[in-house]
Amino acid sequence: MSANLSNSGSTSDLQVQASSEALLRGSTAPVRRNWAQYLRWLLLFAGGILMVMPLAYMMSTSFKFPFEVYNLNLVPEEPTLENYTYVLEDGRFLQWFINSLIIATLTTVSSVFFDALVGYTLCKYRFPGRYVVFIAILSTLMIPTEMLVIPWYLMSQQFGWLDTTWGIMFPGLMTAFGVFLMKQFFETVPDDFIEAARIDGLNELQIWWTVAMPLVKPALAALAIFVFLGNWTAFIWPLIVTTSQDMYTLPVGLTTFSVEQAVEWELVMTGAAISVLPTLIVFLVFQRFIIRGVVMAGLKG
């Protein structure tokens, strides 16, 4: 009987020790999770600071006098609005801004329309050579833009498109990336919806516009933002195809603030700060669609 009592006592001691160890593990687990969470927040905060610093320095420089440009302080010693006054009163800057806005807007509308149309056709139509056409379109993504500049220039010269709005726009009126993106999203549209619309008597164009397009709005918004930003910040091709300052886009026009002796960085930064506003507006308007588009793309993948 004494042996049984000793065994039961040792068993209870082991149970108490095990329960205490479990409590200790349970109490340290939240601490470990909190430290890991704090570390993630710290890394994200540091990454955010690194990304915002160039923008902050650009905004700070736009309020500085020329003698303060090379001062790395984010807060100007003598803030001034003379740079904004000079840039906005310069008729060339307003013309460059309008040129960029027209080109980026028209190119975005054209690219979204044709990319969605081609992507829908390659996704929902069954015809011989469909995959060959799709692979041929995707293969153009492997060609660097620098290699396409010469054919584009020769084409513009042949058709008289040099130094024209059309000459700046035509390379981006339809994109291979947009076709690929829209085709992948149209894959999520059930074929039953298409067949039901056909039974209701809708033609193919009506089905594409009224049935399929509303179901891929996040992809359309994401594509529109990518195309708009790409054309708003384009530099190489507009620099090559334009010869007169009246046809310059904003990125090309800002280079004219550079002279042989020095670069007027305060004016360049001021023009860059103003040029950021349309991109911020576009992003703020369509950001919820971008998030939905990324989520849908991730779920589909």
Image (cartoon, grey):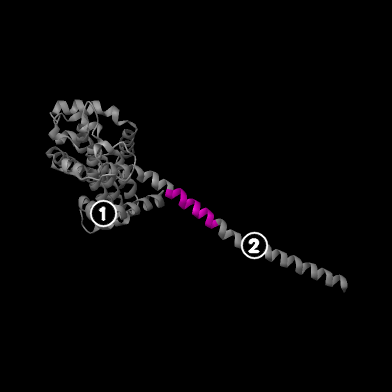
Mark 1 — residue? 285
Q: Nearer the viewer, residue 182 or 206?
A: 182
Residue type (three-letter) at the residue carrying disc 2: Leu
How far across and how far down the image is residue 279, in percent? 25, 47
Q: Is residue 247 above or below residue 221?
A: above
On the picture, is 29 further left or further right than 193? right
Q: Quadrant of residue 228?
A: top left
- What crowding class fits label 1: few (fewer than 14 Cα within 10 Å), some (14-19), or many (20 or more)? few
Q: Quadrant of residue 262?
A: top left
Q: Nearer the viewer, residue 180 or 33?
A: 33
Numbered range of the magenta stretch? 33-45
Residue 229 can be seen, yes or no: yes
Residue occupying the far bottom of the picture: 1
x 72%, y 67%: residue? 16
Disc nearer the start of the sequence (1/2): 2
How far across and how far down the image is residue 61, in percent? 28, 41
Q: State yes or no: residue 36 in magenta.
A: yes
- What crowding class fits label 2: few (fewer than 14 Cα within 10 Å), some (14-19), or many (20 or more)? few
x 70%, y 64%: residue? 18
Residue type (three-letter) at the residue carrying disc 1: Val
Quadrant location, the N terminus: bottom right
Mark linked to residue 24:
2
- Give the Cα distance between marks 1 and 2: 50 Å
- The secondary structure that dominates the magenta segment is helix
How far across and how far down the image is residue 23, in percent? 64, 64
How far across and how far down the image is residue 108, in percent? 22, 44
Residue occupying the far front of the picture: 77
Q: Secondary structure at mark 2?
A: helix
